[in-house]
Amino acid sequence: MPHAPAANYDMTESWARDADQSDPLRAWRDRFHIPKINGRDCVYMCGNSLGLQPKSARAAIEEELDDWRDLGVDAHLDAAHPWLPYHEELREGAARLVGALPSEVVMMNSLTVNLHLLMVSFYRPTPKRFKVLIEDDAFPSDSYAVVSQIKHHGLDPATSLIRVKARPGEHAIRTEDLTALLEREGEQIAMVLIGGVNYLVGQLFHMEQITACARAQGCCVGWDLAHAAGNVPLHLHDWGPDFAAWCSYKYVNSGPGAVAGAFVHERHAGADLPRFAGWWGTDPKTRFKMGKEFEPVTSADAWQLSNPPILALAPVRASLEIFDEVGMDSIRAKSVRLTGYLEFLLGERLGERVRILTPTDPEQRGAQLSISAAGMSRDVQRALHDDGVVCDFREPDVIRVAPTALYNTFHDVWVLCQSLAARLGVAGT
Ligand SMILES: *Cc1c(COP(=O)(O)O)cnc(C)c1O
């Protein structure tokens, strides 16, 4: 396994302690509840799966419960955060998170639902251009959603779905292979839908270049940002995809099944696109005239169907406030250093014993490293858990660990590597 540049790192525990002392984001950890295992703060490396609870989440939810208790229906207008325009309060923070204009984003539904609603508008197969391009190891829900859309249009996934693979022996998909494929087959491709950060190997795609290449071929482009939002800086407006969607319970820390995000590029605002409509997609100025014609608002809100779940949006609002205060650039700066340290320490402590499937280039990954090792098993993951280290296991021999900049420490990474070396029986531990 190639080692990360060692210049800035050292394998001693005291180095990790010192790195935490001089970490400009160190105070943010205290804004989160850290679960305990055996009475001690655990080493939580699962932010790629379910982010930890911000301490501000409870108060945000309770505030809405109180306003419901005290105001009933009047809370739509009179609550501290009035419910009628509630989703608008999340718009700016969500837009900053993904690098969009406020009018390009809306927080609604859950991720797979949003993918479907957006595909209704942006997957419009014609006899000549009908294929969909996804990653071969796309998240299963994305695969299912795409296949069902293809079938919904009366097409056959066997001829309409292209799954782009990494080269034999490689784990990441090379940008040049993707763009070559687009240049070769782009005329037949109606839609490209890729995970901005792949959930399995943690590859961060070159979204700008791939978007530009696909659009030059006339394809619609969507990004699934489930593992990218809150993890890496995004510039959706400038990169120019047609649409994107993300969930808020991974790096965005908004709680299990949290309300998801959707992005529709400004160039589609007000366009007469096919869509599934509901009353919350109409212009708020005329919404309560209860007319018979659907008059879409000229923003991403046009894809909204229902009046939003206030209790579910409250923790999203609380979490977006944290991202606004910290800023994605500082999060990314720490994240690159933290994940680089993890890579360095794995190399020092476990050497040839582990293989990192995630790209070595920091530009091609976010927080997560996917680690494969002979002897890795669910039992090893459980043993790590007994040591107070939480990470997740994927068959046959991969654990995914994601030190997240907001609440993980360098010492967390040190403990993880210590425990992993011991549990894999590496000498010297
Ligand atoms: C986590 C994840 C999902 C989950 O979908 P839900 O609709 O939120 O259950 C879907 N796609 C990707 C790429 C994911 O990482």
Image (cartoon, grey):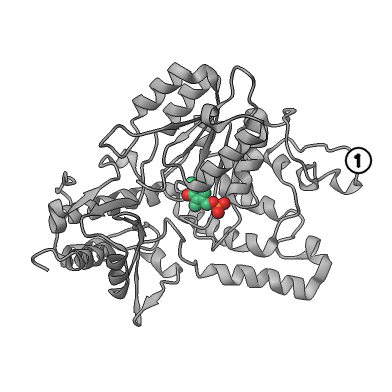
Along the viewing direction, whichever of 115 and 321 lies nearer the viewer: 115
Along the viewing direction, whichever of 23 and 350 lies nearer the viewer: 350
Say above or below: 64 vs 91. Answer: below
**The C terminus sits in image quarter:** bottom left
Say above or below: 62 vs 186. Answer: below
Q: Is residue 177 in view from this perspective?
A: yes
Q: Position of residue 179 (x, y in %)?
A: 40, 23
Q: Position of residue 386 (x, y in %)?
A: 30, 75
Q: Is residue 181 left or right of residue 144?
A: left
Q: Position of residue 244 (x, y in %)?
A: 56, 39
The answer to whether the beta carbon of the residue marked 1 is less than 8 Å from any atom of ligand 1 is no
Q: What residue would you read off at disc 1? A: 292
Residue type, label 1: Lys
Q: Secondary structure at mark 1?
A: loop
Q: Position of residue 400 (x, y in %)?
A: 34, 55
**Residue drawn at (34%, 72%) of the image:** 42
Callout 1 environment at 10 Å: few (<14), some (14 to 19), or many (20+)? few
Q: Quadrant of residue 220?
A: top right
**Residue drawn at (52%, 30%) of the image:** 158
**Residue drawn at (29%, 68%) of the image:** 379
Q: Is residue 10 in view from this perspective?
A: no
Q: Is residue 414 left or right of residue 392?
A: left
- Residue extending farthest to the left is 428
Q: Quadrant of residue 167?
A: top left
Say above or below: 203 vs 130. Answer: below
**Residue drawn at (74%, 47%) of the image:** 305
